[in-house]
Image: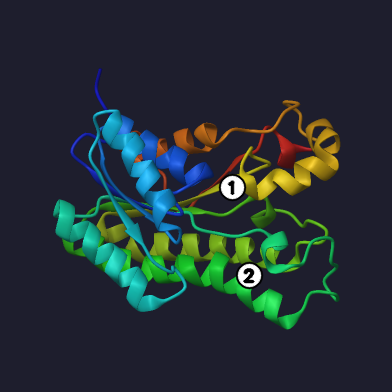
Amino acid sequence: MTLMLAGKTALVTGGGNGIGRAAALAFAREGARVAVADYEAEAAQATVALINQAGGQAISLSGDVTRAAQVQAMVDATVAAFGRLDCAFNNAGIAPYQVDSTSQSTSEWSEESFDRMIEVNLKSVWLSLKYELPVMAAQSAGVIVNTASIAGMIGLKSATAYVAAKHAVIGLTKTAAIEFAQQGIRVNAVCPGFIETRMTERAVANRGDQIKASTPIGRLGTPAEIAEMVVWLCSDRASYVTGAAYAVDGGWTAI
């Protein structure tokens, strides 16, 4: 069986849990060497242990994706360990409840909560692009996938800064894709719907039946299902795909 990413190197931010961990495992399964970055160092190390136990090759990195020097250090460490950077999955992010804004309307969000959401969910993606793109340009090749959301395609009540950030991630994705297409770099976004992760636990606990009823497939997605899209986008099988944002949402946005 031919592995989709044999001999490639991948960097995954937010790789300690959920979608990031599933993607890191999928990258390794498809033959890539993986740098797993997470603010929670122990979570990143746990993902690396799973990869190594399965016969893969990985390193763990920790740092704050909202700080330029630390993002640059993550990219530099990946290149130092593996010699190049072929794939990057810019996945780190937070949910409204993590900035104390659950069930708050646009006028109720605090400035502090708004700023923190934009910093983690948008600025971190831009910083990642800022340091990944020059490395890939020097190689004349590379693929980047950014985690957006169905909230980057539609509006969602009580998620104003989250929605704003995810819409902006899609805009960043399209712009970078245009700018770097002639340098052999593809940039796309994946837009998960409601996925079974710790970020959605509260929403599911409060309105799980409603979410499932609003999803044509009738269930939540799994992190592994998002990972499959990410790995495909990073492979040569998606060689003509750039500047796109893919909903992986069980049909939620089709309604």
Image-based side of 118 in relation to 254, left or right: left
Q: Which quadrant would the N terminus be assigned to in this image?
A: top left
Distance from the alpha carbon under mark 1 to that under mark 2? 17 Å
Residue at numbered disc 1: 191
Q: How many marks?
A: 2
* Type of colouring: rainbow
Which residue type does callout 1 highlight? Cys
Q: What is the number of the mark on residue 117?
A: 2
- Could you tell me which residue is drawn at 70 percent across and 75 percent down? 113
Which residue type does callout 2 highlight? Met
Estimate the x, y position of residue 162 in percent, counting from the top left.
Answer: 68, 63
Front-lying residue, 70 or 178: 70
**Dot 2 alpha-carbon crowd within 10 angstroms: few under 14, some 14 to 19, many 20 or more:** many
- Could you tell me which residue is drawn at 78 percent across and 56 percent down? 156
Q: Are marks 1 and 2 in contact (CB under 8 Å)?
A: no
Residue 180: quadrant of the picture: bottom left
In the rendered view, would you say 53 is above or below 42? above
Q: Residue furthest front?
A: 42
In the rendered view, would you say 73 is above or below 215? below
In the rendered view, would you say 179 is above or below 214? below
- Could you tell me which residue is drawn at 38 percent across and 34 percent down? 26
Between discs 1 and 2, the one toward the N terminus: 2
Estimate the x, y position of residue 54 in percent, counting from the top left.
Answer: 29, 28
Front-lying residue, 231 or 11: 11
Q: Is residue 133 visible?
A: no
Q: Is residue 59 visible?
A: yes
* SS assignment at label 2: helix
Front-lying residue, 14 or 6: 14
Estimate the x, y position of residue 42 in percent, counting from the top left.
Answer: 41, 52
